[in-house]
Amino acid sequence: MTRGQPANWKVEPPASWKVDASLVAVTLIWGATFVLVKQALADVSTLLFLTLRFSIAAVALALIFRKEFRAPNASASLLRGVLAGTFLFGGYVLQTAGLKFTSASKAGFITGLFVPLVPLIGGLVLQKLPQISELAGIVIAFTGLLLLTVQKDILDIGRGDLLEAGCAVAYACHILILGRFAPKSNLGVLTVAQIATGALLGAATFWWVEPVRITLTLNVWVALAVTSLLATALAFSVQTWAQRWSSPTRTVLIFSLEPVFAWLTSYLIAGEVLSHRGMAGAALILAGILMVELKPFKKPAQRKAVGSTMPQ
């Protein structure tokens, strides 16, 4: 509810396909920026890049949503955003640190553990189990992630792998926190708070966690502009809005498309070819999403009823 609206005013839920499409668009943006970030990191230290990315996004969002901080529920939304932002940036830091000690393929797979972790942690904490179709979709999509990212060294567990596992837990908690608080929070304040929290945490860590370096090349400028405004400010605003209407399980399933979009971008820009194993993995991820959308384990009448309302 925003200022000036009556207490009993309710927001009409959007069509479920619009919510899903918005989450797919967010995933596409994240996957497409992978190449840009990889190129930029040759000229700037990782945590400094993340700090600049989150800081620019926070300033842009604060200007857009500045009036929302006068809303009655602004204080509660601010605290919720700080909690969400802590897990969000923590996930970025753990993922970045883990990449120094493990391969990119293993990092991609272990980070992808957030896909099954969301319904698992959500079921334990919220005491609400996902539907059978959602569980089946998660299993299929996670199998696809395994095929898409796992190499021969997957059973060799090291320090970097544990850091990536922590990243997966942090990402899962971030999605669950948004799923819990977005429906009853001021979305503008919630969005600004989580991104600003990431910027502050970055500012407090980038100068001592790793050697600071930056050369302001064209790659760095382009990557900062795209990731801060599109992949952070816009993407997390859309995610926060979408999670007001979408379940955490449904959200994380759509997010499993990110490595698929990352490969498509790499193919278009760098000509990187996906193996048959990788293609099978991508197909399974899509199959897992279709499993949730079509709900084959429900009777026709139940599917019609569920399809006419937003996912719970």
Image (spheres, rainbow, N blue to C red):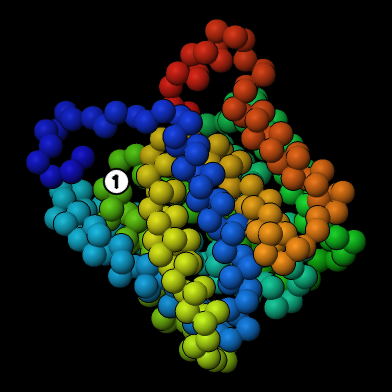
Q: Which residue appears at 44% of the width and 34% of the height?
A: 18
| Res. 121 visible in picture | no
Q: Is residue 69 left or right of residue 248?
A: left
Q: Which residue appears at 78% of the width and 52% of the height?
A: 148
Which is more toward the observer, 221 or 135? 221
Q: Position of residue 267 (x, y in %)?
A: 72, 59
- In the picture as drawn, the residue positioned furthest to the right comes out as 152
The quadrant of the rendering that contains the N terminus is top left
In the displayed structure, 246 sits above or below 50; it is above
Q: Is residue 282 left or right of residue 18?
A: right
* Secondary element at image label 1: loop
| Res. 134 visible in picture | yes
**Badge 1 density bin: few <14, some 14–19, many ≥20, Cα 10 Å:** many
User: Which residue carries the number 1 mark?
Assistant: 185
- In the image, what residue type sits under mark 1? Ser
Q: Position of residue 155 (x, y in %)?
A: 86, 60
